[in-house]
Image (spheres, coloured by chain):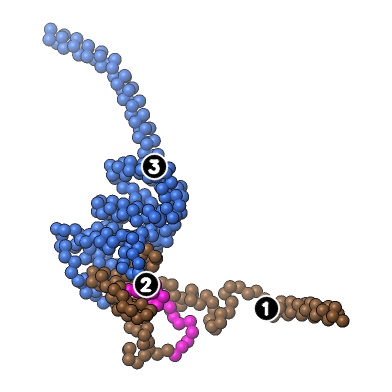
């Protein structure tokens, strides 16, 4: 009795596989090129590369500080960052934005909120936990939004 | 009589000259050709060591500095102009080139010793090696940069607002390229920036040497950046 039950299970599993395979083959579109892959968003995967009005990969030229759109937004980077590496040896951002360098370079000084460690203790310089600047501060490109949205900047920041 | 003497004397001279001329010209000709061949061969073999191909035939260069350089603007850029190893690291003028080539024999010696034959050894030496290049560039007023880049040819309108401002400021202070442009083609050694633990790297004084005395000297506040 036990044996026959096992055999029945194997048979059922086999049937399921046999059933699903042709179904898959029928369900798939005929020739699916890379261009027709559908993303979760309703836009083609390659949309960002096609550019259109903007160029998603061309960095914008240097300019003055950019306006902020929401409260607590990390200020955006208004210049190109090509070759600006942040490594264990050297942090290119801090080479201009550190307080000791900002006077000479004319860069915006790092916020004093960055001098605090996670326990709220004030440090004499930027806290190591703030070392990777571009985790929050990002450069800009002239890319058009992939998805229509109704975002409006905070009224008080306009 | 005088006429005859003259004639006899010139005939004797002519005889000597006639006999010596082929020897002199022969020796001169052979010497000239040997010289051309020797100099050509010498120069040819010297130039052979002045190529990127030669530089990266050593894994010390190929696996470290060459890989880093391949991510930079001197390797790949909009216009496709490329500066290879010797363009920056070997002087173009003959005299300076000879001096640098003789100094390079020390590098051959360390190749034999295997001083930097692993990435770990290379990185341990990186600060020292970088400082050597910074010192050389400072001493020569960044001669090799200026083979291509000229202050006089700058179009400040084409430069970014940061570059345009700082270039004019640096120029008026008598700074040289390497004073600011360090680590543009290779990864930097540790530089002290006062964040976290001591890195035992180059000090800010070494990394940003102050403007030379005698020029305008004073580093006042940066000029207000023009909004564009």
Of the two numbered discs 1 and 3 in the rendering, the one whose residue sits closer to the viewer: 3
Quadrant occupied by the N terminus of chain B? top left
Q: CA distance from mark 1 to mark 2?
A: 51 Å
Write down which chain is painted brown.
Answer: A
Q: Residues within 10 Å of mark 3 (few under 14, many from 20)?
A: few
Residue at the extreme bottom of the image, as rendered: A155
Q: Report the magenta stretch's main SS.
A: loop
In the rendered structure, which segment of residues is drawn in magenta? A126-150
Question: Is residue A11 found left or right of B127 in the rendered image?
Answer: right
- The residue that mark 3 highlights is B109
Viewer-nearest residue: B224 or B116: B116
Residue A22 falls in which quadrant of the image? bottom right
Labels 1 and 2 share a subunit = yes
- Front one among B113 and B177: B113
Q: Position of residue A132 (x, y in %)?
A: 39, 72
Shade of chain B as shown in the rendered figure: blue
Q: Give the secondary structure at mark 3.
A: helix
Q: Evaluate whether residue A93 shows in this view.
A: yes
In the displayed orientation, state which residue is furthest to the right.
Answer: A1
Question: Mark 3 belongs to which subunit?
Answer: B
Residue that appears at 83% across and 78% down: A7
């Amino acid at each position: 009795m036990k044996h026959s039950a096992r055999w029945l299970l194997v048979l059922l599993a086999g049937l399921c596989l046999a059933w699903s395979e042709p179904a898959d083959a029928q369900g798939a579109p005929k020739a699916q090129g890379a261009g027709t892959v559908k993303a979760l968003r309703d836009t083609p995967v390659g949309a960002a590369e096609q550019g259109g009005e903007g160029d998603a990969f061309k960095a914008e030229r240097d300019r003055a500080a950019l306006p902020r759109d929401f409260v607590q937004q990390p200020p955006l980077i208004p210049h190109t960052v090509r070759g600006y590496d942040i490594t264990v040896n050297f942090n290119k951002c801090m080479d201009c934005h550190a307080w000791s360098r900002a006077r000479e370079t004319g860069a915006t000084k790092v916020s004093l909120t960055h001098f605090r460690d996670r326990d709220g203790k004030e440090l004499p310089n930027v806290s190591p936990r703030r070392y990777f600047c571009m985790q929050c501060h990002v450069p800009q490109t002239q890319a058009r939004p992939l998805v229509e949205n109704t975002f409006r900047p905070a009224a008080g920041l306009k | 009589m005088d006429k005859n003497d003259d004639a006899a004397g010139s005939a004797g001279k002519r005889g000597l000259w006639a006999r010596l001329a082929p020897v002199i010209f022969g020796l001169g000709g052979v010497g000239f050709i040997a010289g051309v061949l020797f100099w050509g061969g010498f120069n040819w073999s010297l130039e052979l060591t002045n190529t990127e191909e030669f530089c990266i035939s050593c894994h010390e260069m190929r696996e470290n500095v060459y890989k880093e350089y391949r991510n930079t603007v001197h390797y790949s850029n909009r216009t496709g102009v490329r500066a290879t190893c010797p363009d920056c690291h070997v002087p173009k003028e003959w005299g300076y080139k000879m001096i640098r080539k003789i100094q390079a024999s020390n590098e051959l010696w360390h190749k034999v010793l295997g001083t930097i034959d692993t990435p770990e050894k290379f990185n341990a030496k990186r600060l020292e090696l970088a400082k050597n290049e910074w010192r050389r560039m400072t001493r020569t007023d960044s001669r090799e940069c200026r083979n291509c880049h000229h202050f006089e040819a700058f179009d400040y309108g084409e430069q970014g607002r940061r570059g345009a401002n700082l270039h004019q400021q640096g120029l008026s202070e008598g700074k040289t390229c390497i004073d600011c442009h360090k680590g543009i083609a290779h990864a930097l050694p540790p530089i002290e920036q006062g964040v976290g633990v001591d890195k035992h790297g180059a000090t800010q004084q070494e990394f940003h040497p102050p403007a030379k005395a005698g020029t305008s000297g004073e580093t006042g506040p940066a000029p207000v950046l023009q909004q564009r």
